[in-house]
Image (tube, rainbow, N blue to C red):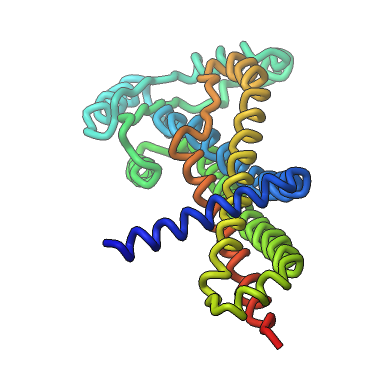
Amino acid sequence: MTRLRAWAADHLRACVSALGRLSRSRLASGMTAAVLGIALALPSAFLLLLQNLEASTDGWERGARISLFLQDSLEEARYRALAAEFAEHDEIRETRVVTPDEALDEFQALGGTEVALDLLDENPLPPLIIVTPVPDLSAQELEQLTLGLGEHADVEQARLDLEWVQRLHAIMDLVRRGIWLVAALLAMTVILVVGNTIRLAIENRREEIVIAKLIGATNAFIRRPFLYEGAWYGLGGGLLAALLVELGRAALTGPVRQLSALYDAEGLLRGLGFSGVGLVLLCGVLLGLLGSWLAVGRHLAAIEPR
């Protein structure tokens, strides 16, 4: 128990002394922390933006529609009976019949097509059944349902009105991988910045390190304060990154609400939250420790008393 208390006291002393040294050079320490904060804020902001985009598109799949274009030769009684038959399917919530005349009226309501339609001898639009699936189906289940309905003998073509959402998800997956690549590069930047800062600190305290080794100090004892300096740099950078992300979110909240109002969507832009802030801080501390460890391990061994 006594050894454990001594170990904890030694670490606490090293942690506090590292913070004290950083506070005595506020400008240099603040600039280093600012570089780390910006490097951590960029991928955090992009990932948060992507998370908000994914959350806003989750409900779009529940609004999927399947358009069944029927054979032109079918009579109205037949495709209405066909719609009632499809409505009994467990994966279908409701069906709606659109007759060729109704489809032509809707097409004319778009405007600008009256002259072209008057030149036609007959209505070219086929009968249509709009199928609304139950809201709990996944994208794969919707595709299977569409293929199954399209194989019916009276169905000319089945089209799922969800392809653009799937393309959007594919684009977001590509963007997500790009963000992680940028995050990895910025993480390397954080490690290099911390490592170079700790290297300069080691060079400035070379004589102190030599004297400490002469009186019997181990490398672990000398390394400890530098590791805590790296952790403090990472913690400061993480705090600044979380602050920058939240400030950016606050600045975008108004425009996002205006854009969402135009599309009758939810205009809430989610923030990092406690878990997100904790994750950013943890990443900052770990990267700071890693950069400090690499710098200390390389340069401390080269300093030996002569």
| Whether residue 168 is visible | yes
Query: Residue drawn at (29%, 25%), measured in percent from left and top?
Result: 93
Q: Give the camera-side residue of 218 and 121.
A: 218
Residue 164's x, y, as percent? 55, 38
- Rendering quarter of residue 46: top right
Query: Residue drawn at (54%, 79%), measured in percent from left and top?
Result: 216
- Rendering quarter of residue 124: top right
Q: Please identify the residue farthest to the bottom as the structure is shown.
A: 306
Residue 181's x, y, as percent? 63, 58
Q: Give the camera-side residue of 120 and 167.
A: 167
For residue 93, above or below residue 145: above
For residue 74, above or below residue 175: above
For residue 122, above or below residue 186: above
- Rendering quarter of residue 288: bottom right
Q: Which quarter of the image is occupied by the C terminus?
A: bottom right
Q: Give the camera-side residue of 282 and 91.
A: 282
Judged left or right of residue 137, residue 302 is right
Judged left or right of residue 73, residue 166 is right
Residue 195's x, y, as percent? 68, 65
Q: Which quarter of the image is occupied by the N terminus?
A: bottom left
| Whether residue 72 is visible | no
Q: Please identify the residue farthest to the front as the structure is shown.
A: 215
Query: Residue drawn at (46%, 30%), measured in percent from left and top?
Result: 60
Query: Residue drawn at (31%, 34%), measured in percent from left and top?
Result: 136
Q: Give the camera-side residue of 102 and 93.
A: 93
Residue 299's x, y, as percent? 68, 76
